[in-house]
Amino acid sequence: CFAVDFGDVVLMPFLVDLEVSKSIQRTIDYGAGAPRRAYGNVQHRVHGSWPVIKWRVIVTDTGGDAVTNSYSRDALGDTPDPFGAVRIVLVGTTHPGNIGASARAMKAMGLRRLWLVSPKVFPAAEATAMASGADDILAAAEVVPSFEAAIAGCTMVFGTTARTRHLQWPVLSPAEAALQVRGAVADGPVAIVFGREQAGLSNAELDLCQRAIRIPTDEGFNSLNLAQAVQICVYELRN
């Protein structure tokens, strides 16, 4: 057991694996000055001879059913970031759980840069819960109002599609796309874009991409969950 010192507030001793209580969430939230999204570097100062432990405590929703994982490492911390030039962009996501699950898929494969275009609900407790330890990715996510803003500055944009479309650029498998992404990052940021759960990317949005990615599926059923599609693409990128 040890005590945690949040500046002016010292909490009672608790076990290392104990969930952070809602009172901690409120303390962090008030200190950060944001009513719905607060995160900051918090130093756990252990009293006595124990070493100092630093964690990033993140609150992505402070509502009545808020969920916080107090043991998430900082997504933009000091650890190496081999995919720092790769953006995973989710467009118009309607279900916050899909955002959290996508963040989990990203973090498991070492990707950290999540961009959200006009999500219906974010931040949300359900996104935090589905992130299952990847809520640092959610806290660092860039939320932008348009597709154009999400891909601004990118030297190459890969758009995903589940449908067979007549496109003027190559349609690649995730493995083929991964090879091209690795080559393209030498010239600058690269975006891999995923569309809405029901409709995907519009033709106008695909027109702003330079490559398309299509995940091979069974001919009779090609419906993949958004986070599943993200997982497949980031797995290929890592491997």
Image (cartoon, rainbow, N blue to C red):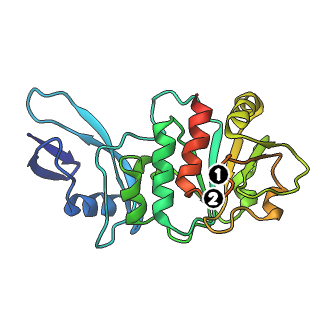
Q: Residue furthest front?
A: 220
Q: Are marks 2 and 1 in contact (CB under 8 Å)?
A: yes
Tag shown at residue 25:
none
* Location of mark 1 (residue): 218
* Location of mark 2 (residue): 221
Q: Which type of secondary structure does the marked residue at label 2 adopt?
A: loop
Where does the image place residue 2, in percent across and percent down from the top left?
A: 10, 40
Q: Residue at x 64, y 39 (%)?
A: 86
The amino acid pointed to by label 1 is: Asp
Where does the image place residue 103, in percent across and percent down from the top left?
A: 49, 49
Q: Residue at x 23, y 49 (%)?
A: 6
CA distance for labels 2 and 1 = 5 Å
- Picture quarter containing residue 37? bottom left
Q: Examine the rendering and report whether any part of residue 58 can be seen.
A: yes
Label 1: few (<14), some or many (≥20) within 10 Å?
A: few
Where does the image place residue 92, in percent across and percent down from the top left?
A: 63, 66
Is residue 96 or residue 80 the one in the foreground? 96
- Location of the N terminus by quadrant is top left
Q: Is residue 211 left or right of residue 79?
A: right
Q: Is residue 158 above or below residue 36?
A: above
- Location of the C terminus by quadrant is top right
Is residue 59 or residue 19 the one in the foreground? 19
The amino acid pointed to by label 2 is: Phe
Q: Is residue 16 left or right of residue 179?
A: left
Is residue 128 or residue 189 the one in the foreground? 128
Q: Is residue 93 left or right of residue 56?
A: right
Where does the image place residue 166, in percent across and percent down from the top left?
A: 88, 56
Q: Residue at x 29, y 70 (%)?
A: 65
Q: Is residue 149 left or right of residue 84?
A: right
- Picture quarter containing residue 202? bottom right
Q: Which type of secondary structure does the marked residue at label 1 adopt?
A: loop
Q: Is residue 118 above or below residue 211?
A: below
